[in-house]
Amino acid sequence: MTVASIEERIETLTEEQLRHGLAVFRAKLRAPEAAYLNACVHCGLCADSCHYYRTEPVLDNVPAHKLDHVAAAFKRHFTAAGRLAPGLVGARPFDRTMVRAWLDAVFGRCTLCGRCALNCTIGIGLPRVFRAARAALAAMDLVPDDLQATVDNSLEHGNNMAITRKEWVETVQWLEEELQMETGDPGARLPLDKHGAKILFTVNPREPKFFPLSLLASAKVFWAAGEDWTLASDPGWDLTNYGLFNCNDEQAGRITRNLVDAMERLGCQTLVIGECGHGFGAARWEGPEWLQTRYPFELRSVLELLEEYIESGRITVDPSRNPQLVTLHDPCNLVRHGGVSEPQRRVLRRCVAHFVEMTPSREHNFCCGGGGGQLAMAQYKDRRIRAGGMKAQQIRATGAEIVVAPCHNCIDQLMELNKEYGLGIQIRTVAEMVAAALVTVGEPAAEGKATP
Amino acid sequence: MSAAVPQPLHLAVLAAAAWAVGALAFAWRRARSFGRRVLFAPPAGDPAAGVRYAFTAALLPQAKESVRLHLPSYAAGVLFHLGAFAALGRLAATMAGLELPPGPAWAVASIALLGAAAGLALLARRAITPHLRGLSTLDDYLANVLTTSFVGLGGAALLHPPLEPAWLVAAVLLLVYVPVGKIRHCVFFFSARAAMGAFFGYRGTFPSARQGG
């Protein structure tokens, strides 16, 4: 069976489908979004806050212009002024032309990073509006195919890369042997399905697939800390949730359910989300909303756990073992939208000899360009790489040799930027830096001091 | 310094003001009717602290790159709004039959005229900056022209009382237009900014751990 292209699907949209899309859009709006859609004054000061605009200064990349496509339909269908005087207030109907504009604006030119929201004169939370627009497009089967395929993988296989249970288990077993060799401890484990373990640790499927040393590093730190932890063998080990990006909340909720079910199945106390920005955002902030319930367990970022290990003395680290100049990338879903900005800094300051911040940093960071599902949408690759130019500039300005990114999606993008912009950097996770700095029993700790 | 207000214009201003307040209240209530989002994820911070931050430090240049990069536009915007508030204050006083003493009248006139100049500058910027021109609808120009006229005439009429009727006509036109177009942000600025502050406050992002870059 031939799958129709997205343009063919737009071309054959029926009036009923358009009405359904608009109804879904309306259903996703609450009072804050209604206020946002009434509030833009077209001052244009948001333009420079967007990495798309900064690297390609055209009208289509101005956040207010992207918002305007959505606001135009909102005004036309949901405000009196838009119905009575559409030409005056810029109201336009929700038709095929508008659908194309939405698709290009909210999927093709936005990573939902939210930097524009902080810089908006009014304070418009553009990503919240764009999520409603993406939901409408999803309801009309207009999610870019490769992004939807990633979601479908999670729904069908329990992880977004369609890794089989056998592959996953074998990878974990192989890494366990590696851990035992590296630590010299035959009792070192990567526990699978350990019932009653305190912690269920979840990972990005890119770790077993492409970056097993990241998982090994986390396991080594857990081993050093004497943590009571486990991985799940069945659905529930993958922390990613591209439902955050296709904005089909029903599908996103089903993917979140994998984590909740694994926690219940294994009887763990704390769900620990590994280094993944959107995974943290999806599980910590959106998951309970998708499921319309509070989790009956604690959820934490692994970064908070790593900090706790160091601060409590459960592990000892020696910063001189990471002598290079290190900088930190702030994933948007972890920091700006996630509220986790300091643990990773405190950890790195204890684990590396020389640390330098990017400018700007924390919630003011620039998106790497890989967020919002962009890494999964091949048709927008050129834009993604160009938009990543802002992050490349930031990195180059630090002079750092190592960029630490607590997010595997960001790492993928940074690797491409490294190649494209000739940055000559190494890219690491926080756990990798901690593992490299670990002082294990019997080893002397050097006197190296971390830079404040 | 103020001329006698012709009664029909006086009534027209009051009627337009009533329309503006009523229609804005309706628009605000309609937006509120979209409902609240019940949050299940436990907070990481204090939404109220986020709102306070959003209305204070988050608006300052050190916390806002868009301001730092566009200080002249920011200053013009601040002046334009100060001018509008001055002219509105004067309108309220006029409707109440109060006459400003010479000192305050000069101050209000100066602020209003500076505000009108800022409004004209912003209008020119909109017309000549490509991405702003591309963003703009008829509403953007009309809202500016109506406000600038009201603010400018409000200042000028203090210095030259025969302009008073023209100013009141400008006031009527502006007040009638307020709920229709972008000037609705006089209400939605507050609800949008509060929502944004509460969102980032709930998630522990606001107040900022360290302001600025």
Image (cartoon, rainbow, N blue to C red):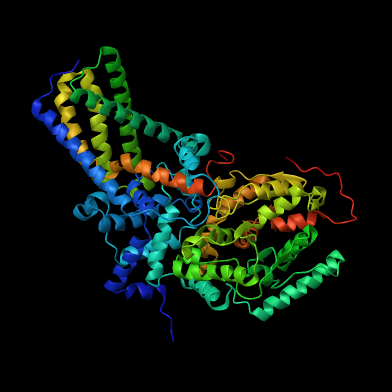
- Compared with B104, A24 (above or below) is below
Q: Position of residue B97 (x, y in %)?
A: 18, 21
Q: Quadrant of the N terminus of chain B?
A: top left
Can I make out residue A423 in this image? no
Eyeballing the image, is A1 above or below A18? below
Which percent across, then down, holds residue A114? 49, 51
Quarter holding the C terminus of chain B is: top right
Q: Residue at x 32, y 64 (%)?
A: A22
Locate residue B79: give its quadrant: top left
Work out whether B41 lies above or below B112: below
| Total residue callouts | 0
Extreme residue toward the top, this view: B102
Q: Is residue A191 left or right of residue B190?
A: right
From the viewer's perspective, tell me whether residue B21 is left or right of residue B52.
left
**What residue appears at the point 10 percent right and 25 percent down from the top-left corner?**
B6
Query: Which residue shows up at 75% across the image and 50% down it?
Result: A310
